[in-house]
Amino acid sequence: MSSFKFYKPDNMEDLLKVKEELGGRALILAGGTNLLIYIKEGSIREGTLVDIKSLKELKGISGDNGYIEIGAGVTIAEILESPLLNDRVPFFTDTLKNFANPLVRNMASLGGNIADASPIGDTIPSLLVLNGRIKAACLKGERSVPLDRLFKGPGESNLKPDEVIRTVQFSIPERGKGTFIKLGLRNGTSCSVTSVAVWLAAEDGRVEDIRIAFGGVAPIPLRLKKTESLFKGEKLDEEKIRALSGEIDKEISPITDVRGSAEYRKQVSVRLLSRAVRICMGMEE
Amino acid sequence: MKENFSIIGKRLGGLDEKDKVLGNVVFADDFVMPGMLYARVFRAEKASAKIKCLDILRAQSLPGVICVLTADDVPHNESVKNVVGQTTEVGLLEAKHQVLVKERVRYWGEAIALVAAESPDTACRALELIEVEYEDLPAVFDPLEAMKPDAPKIHGDNNIIASWKLRKGDAEAGFAQADVIVENTYRTPRQEHAHIEPESGVSWMDDMGVINIRYAAQVIEHYRDIATVLGIPESRVRVIGTLIGGGFGGKEDVTVEVFLALLTWKTGRPVKLTYTREEMGYGRHKRHPYVLKYKTGATKDGKLTALEAELVSDAGAYVYLSPWVLVYSTVHSTGPYFIPNVKVDASSVLTNNIMSSACRGFGGMQVAFAYESQMDELAEKLGMDPLELRKKNFLKRGDITASYQEITSEVLLEEAARKAKAALGEKGRGSKTKKIGHGFACSWQSYGRMTYLHDTSSCWVNLEMDGSAVVRTGIPDLGGGQRESVRAITAEVLGLKLEEVHVISTDSQVTPLSGTVTATRALYMSGNAAKLASENVRKIIVEEASEMLSAEPERLNLKDKTVYSVDEPSKLLPLVDVIKRCAAEGKVPQNLATFKAPFTEPITTDIIKDPVFPDFTFGAQAAEVEVDLETGKVNILKWAAAHDVGQAINLNRVEGQIEGGAVQGIGFGIMEDYLEEEGVPLTWNLHDYIIPTSKDVPDIMSIVLQSKSGKGPFGAKGIGEPSISAAAPAIVNAIKDAVGIRIYHIPATPERIFLALQE
């Protein structure tokens, strides 16, 4: 049977003190869209709910010189409504248009989607191709962790028990175009079967830079650096894109679950990558 | 009855809608009583096992726990019912059920014990303290395997619990005449009802020693089952039905009422029991999954010559309504077509899967997927337009079906299909990777219960001194406006406004029993009963007024609380004056009427060769879909649904039923499937069991046809279930049109379509 305490820190320092004291038993409650489900289904049965919804230090979206910083407590809806982000990096806001449903988007925070460390967290593939980093804070100070080194396995990250995500940052690439494709079994309130984000910069049809990240094809959201290296420098046509996309086979290891078989995920991921590259190349809407 | 309706057929704002939107309705779980206990059900986590040891001592001794009940505490734990109309040659004659598991668990989620405690938390904690030691027993999960002689037996010595057949003409000879034959095997999913409101209720013992249960019930007559389990007179059990937040057949079999009654009977205290969403998944029945083998033949002119089909339904671990669901499948298996030679063999088979029972469509929907896929495939082979082929074979009024029933109402299938197709307009253009297709399907579905069940429905109507009316009807309102229809019909007949009619409904000791809200029977049965009772009251008024006005009673009409002569409208009387005079003369303007459906004799052989249903509703739905060649995902772009409802009572509600049926049918067609692995449920919440959202369905274009030829009030037909069946085949036919592949196993998930595209 569950038993929980509740605590509402007044400021960041207060929050970090609680984290220092309780570690993993301090359950960060931002939107609660994951946490409350874990509690209800019994996978978390005790601890102190630490309500950070009103902490100003975790809010705010800022950016200059192509550098964006988003507070971990910013909600998905706030990101979608941000004039700054819609103007400077519409790729990222587009990513979130099919995130769960309006009710969840109003509650769920960006930091929470990352900290949950789900292989299908819908904010993560896009942040991975933006070379996103998080700032993890504890009483002793802060450290910056690249997202592609944050995740260990389903629900597991390299955050230490006394750390919280304070902000998420990325630089907007100077050149190129990004796209995010999510495949769900339905159009609303849908978990991804797989998802792919691609950022691509090309000159005369030749790839100068490409970044590829997937959700749902491995125990963690994944940057596919080997496949990226194969694309780099290549002159792309549809056939070439198809052939190179097929190379992800060696980097991904999807599982079978109620949403799809491993084999389907493998094959459909190849096609989603092809499509994403074609879109970035302007070959398709 | 006059032809110009004041209320019937209009767009009516039901009086309960505002209350529902504002949250004023006291639904089952909203109800509380002083001193109320909270109940939970302890359920098996094995699909097939013997209980070696059940330890409830720790749970019982938890402070706040008032009682823990097991099978030993249930006066009549096991029940046996004969399956009506099955012969001894068929196999098992008896349907065995147990309230709580006595010794043997037959499916994962079966109820073993009941807990009642002072708080919901304590009840929940008590569940964790109950310990069971199991011994695994052999199990079978595939219905085709379960039919084999050496398969583990779920009950008795035969897993086949029902078999029905159609035999008409000579199928072999029919195929010999065919120029084209299409033969396929189809599979349909285990659909969850997914109603918004969980199974829920509150029970208490009143000061006269009657056990009251106020709960979300499609069948208030279950008070009889409660009395049987407790071994007390039926008159000591009272069921009060609430307005229901959806049921779709999920609240047709017994849900919480027997558990609640047992706990109140044991403790003497009020008890609440509301299922969790997860429990609604693994503790409640689903739609029967079917395997359907179809062989259909036609001449090159497009005349159907023969149908041969084998249907197998997975009944799960208990019989419940499976034999009746199978009757529906068998009768409807031909589709709404005249086929001279028919041979259909249908079986329902027990397995260790979750039980299957009633679900909107009741066996009429799985076969629609098969027969409408067959029609399109035949049309393709014949190089014929799919609607042209169907037109050559549609049943007509006066035709005799393969179950030897005459069609006695209009069949507007051609008009329905034509209008639904036309509503789609021009086909979208699609792209290199996303292809667009159009498809449609027709369907038929009976309304009203099987006639050998001798269905009746009663209603009482009374005019008050001020001219307002009170109606008592037992019919539950499932959310479809069943109660509101009774109100509208009474108001129409008595010339009153809707708000001048008060309807008291759904109380087994206060309202005349009107029967179940199942089988698309509510409007047909309780609507006819309300009309009959209202007309009898009207007759009392009109006869009295005819004396007062010196006019022929047939030439008098009631409108706006006035009785007037249709020949001389200036000759009129206020309704209240007539009522007052009635009262003075001891003529009470009230009536208790009972409407009887046609009665037939029970089926005495396994071959169905007599009429089984009062009548049928016909319709067609059409879809425009977009299929993503690279992912297999289907998007529904446009949807049109045309159904002949005979006579709409409230056009808004009719469209609501059509839209709801289409959406639920779309879910069945492309995404819904309650998955189990070796009997262990995998999709027991609405996170993993997915149903369509508002982003998955376009606006439904409802086309309401009104032949006025139905058996319901004013010529109405039922529409609750008939609106669901055509959806899945319409989608599958549209997918075929878009990308050239046919899906034989629904739901047509992205993965299934993707795999089919690779072949």
Image: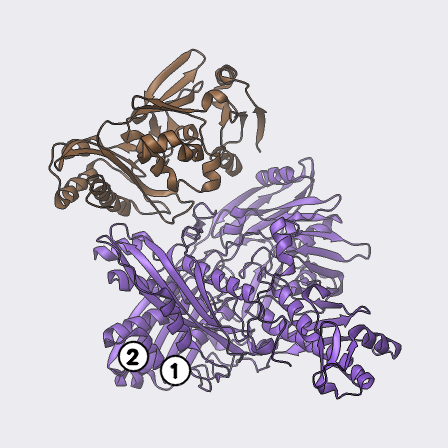
Chain colours: A brown, B purple
Which of the 4 quarters of the picture holds residue B594? bottom right
In the rendered image, the quadrant that contains the N terminus of chain A is: top right
Residue at mark 2: B297
The residue lying toward the viewer, choosing from B148 and A157, is A157
B516 horizontally vs B206: left or right: left
Q: In which quarter of the view is residue B126 placed?
A: top right
Residue B548 rendering spot, x and y as whole percentages: 82, 83
Question: Which disc number belongs to residue B631?
Answer: none
Amino acid carrying mark 2 in the image? Gly
Residue toward you, B390 or B754: B390
Q: Which chain is mark 2 on?
A: B
Residue at the image position 24 percent from the left and 50 percent from the top? B630
Question: Residue B330's spot in the image, x, y percent?
Answer: 44, 74
Residue B322 drawn above or below residue A227: below
Query: Marks 1 and 2, how far apart in space?
Result: 12 Å
| Identity of the residue furthest to the right in this view | B584
